[in-house]
Amino acid sequence: MPPMMRRFAVLLPGLLLVLLLAACTQSTEPLVVEDYLLGTVIRISIHDDGYDTSLTDRVFERVATIERRMSTSEDDYDDTELLTVNRAPAGTATPVSADTFEVLSAALDYSRVSDGAFDVTIWPLVKLWGIGSGGETVPPEGEITAARELVDYHDLTLNADGTVTLAREGMGVDVGAIAKGYAADEAERILRDAGVTSALLDFGGNILVIGSKPDDSPWRIGIQRPDAERSRYIGIVHTADRTVVTSGPYERFFVEDGVRYHHILNPDTGYPSRNGLVQVTIVAERSIDADALSTTSYVLGLTGAYDLIESIKGVEAVFATEERELFLTPGLQESDESPQNTTETHFELTDDEYQVREITAVTDR
């Protein structure tokens, strides 16, 4: 059965979110509504006048539909479209909804562009480790090897008739690294279609903003410091009409023999990714892209991820390393000539224990 959903609405004089700094100034109070979906608390804050919870109810119902179709959590659901795909005999063409097909198509595209650093068929490894769903120990090496051999996006076929085929027995797809972004984009679509011009959507670390704040200043989205409590930030992304998604090892993990094992798995090794990065933040126009690219970048490592992000128009990134260094793509670098209230996207460093460095200092080592 699906997890219990909790929904409530509150009116707040100022907006306080895990990743949002500085409440905006406006004549009326924003409408803020929360629900528990996709394994996290989702918060929608609408800053336009004239809207009530009938609109946010539509958003949450849409997100719940996406979850019911794409979840691979056997603890929460007896059956979903993706569980049906994963349980089908090898070579079976399994029908799925247009939603699921679209997300699988995007996931397959990112599998290709990353050469498998992002692999939509990673489900055997996700299921084996079970991090965040009861997994609290490192699986035996032989089981990791066997599961890793079942991960290969080349063996997933999306057919023209809207069906999905996996070539080998035991394979499976998992869209946990991209479906939340798709859901956030769908929530944005519903709000914009209703005429909303100023809103913030918090999908548990996936932040999406519509327009700017009511005073026409940019939203200020704090990036959590990866080695500290949630209330401490390494910097602020100033932006409007963008999505900001952060991936790191601090949300779902366990510790065994003094080693932390997190949920971002490397399809090539079968183990949690370890390459010197501790956090990646992506800024983009679509949350589905930012969601996929944050995970992809974390697995690729600094130089490979930097090159990938630079090759994609309209996407920027902040990379944080174990040495407390930050590397920014050019579009996030603040210009001294820009007005203070500009809605131009840029990054502001706020933690003096971190240092912004040029990527050439790494590639020249």
Image (cartoon, grey):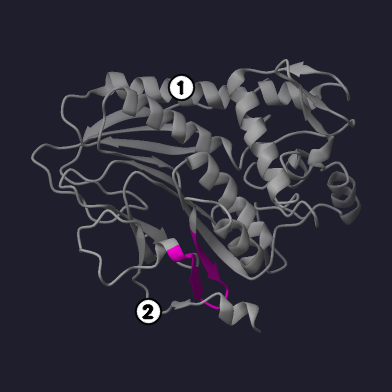
Q: Is residue 106 left or right of residue 51?
A: right
Q: Secondary structure at mark 1?
A: helix
**In the foreground, 16 or 119:** 119
Q: Is residue 196 above or below residue 199?
A: above
Q: Secondary structure at mark 2?
A: loop
Point out which mark residue 322 bears: none
Residue in view at x 15 percent, y 47 percent: 215
Q: Quadrant of residue 160?
A: top right
Question: Which residue matches tag 2?
Answer: 352
Point out which mark residue 62 bears: 1
Tell me which numbered mark, 2 or 1, is placed earlier along the sequence: 1
Is residue 324 on the magenta stretch?
Answer: yes
Q: Is residue 299 left or right of residue 250?
A: right
Q: Position of residue 135 (x, y in %)?
A: 70, 47
Q: Quadrant of residue 253?
A: bottom right
Residue in view at x 28 percent, y 41 percent: 211
Placement of the C terminus among the 4 image quadrants: bottom right
Residue farthest toward the left in the current orientation of the protein = 27
- Magenta segment main secondary structure: strand
Q: How far is disc 2 from disc 1 in space, using C-alphas?
A: 42 Å
Residue in view at x 37 percent, y 53 percent: 19
Stretch of the chain drawn in magenta: 317-330
Q: Position of residue 195 (x, y in %)?
A: 26, 25
Q: Is residue 290 left or right of residue 333?
A: right
Type of the residue with mark 1: Arg
